[in-house]
Image (cartoon, rainbow, N blue to C red):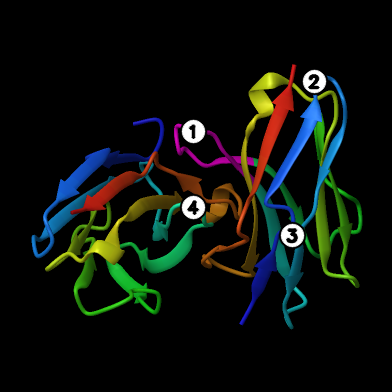
Amino acid sequence: GAGVSQSPRYKVAKRGQDVALRCDPISGHVSLFWYQQALGQGPEFLTYFQNEAQLDKSGLPSDRFFAERPEGSVSTLKIQRTQQEDSAVYLCASSFWGQGPEQFFGPGTRLTVL
Amino acid sequence: AQTVTQSQPEMSVQEAETVTLSCTYDTSESDYYLFWYKQPPSRQMILVIRQEAYKQQNATENRFSVNFQKAAKSFSLKISDSQLGDAAMYFCAYRRSPGAQKLVFGQGTRLTINP
């Protein structure tokens, strides 16, 4: 596709449920990033992949958060046993160094945990 | 750790006027990039402008320009001839160089355009 896509756009979960958020990066983009954006705040880094390798997961807030990118393209962010504090917009971004240093963002998934 | 600070939670400007959004950052690195991203209500982050730290010349993109003061660690965005479509949240962001590096964002400035 022409841009980064994310699904679903909106997700409502009951506390304790598991959720899976999907990101389709721009074709050919080697690097993929996940960010968490709380209401009224700037995005905060969660994790980074280069191809299928997860090179940095220092931003994941707890072991309930897990991300994967098994074939080096589509990525999934999974949150187990969701808590109310997990409510946020989850943004995915991709980049390709040969095209410059900027990251291209998807529209985000708004997660609401009741 | 690097930090980015936007001290103006909200700004407003009359249509066709000029507005400047402020950003300061803290880093011990000498080589890095700075960005301004725009986030409308649709949530899609859109790159407005970028600046390489090694370049002394300020970046310009049509009505958008920056004032990059490396010694002062300041990176402000000037929007000229403001248009209604410029209304959005604006985020200043920093990333190290080289290679793929995470972005560190400021808290954002909500810009309102008054017709």
- Three-letter amino acid code at the position of disc 3: Ser
Rounded to the nearest whole Å, what is the CA distance between mark 4 and mark 1?
Answer: 27 Å
Rounded to the nearest whole Å, what is the CA distance between mark 2 and mark 4?
Answer: 36 Å
Residue at disc 3, secondary structure: loop
B19, above or below B37, in the image? above
- Other residues around mark 2 within 10 Å, as few (<14) / some (14–19) / many (≥20): some
Q: Chain of mark 4?
A: A
Residue at 85% x, 29% y is B80
Rounded to the nearest whole Å, what is the CA distance between mark 3 and mark 2?
Answer: 23 Å
Query: What x and y, as percent, mark residue A77?
Result: 23, 59
> Residue under circle 1?
B41
| Nearest the eye: B57 or B94 | B94
Rounded to the nearest whole Å, what is the CA distance between mark 1 and mark 3?
Answer: 21 Å
| Nearest the eye: B99 or B59 | B59
Residue at 80% x, 54% y is B22
| Nearest the eye: B85 or A41 | A41
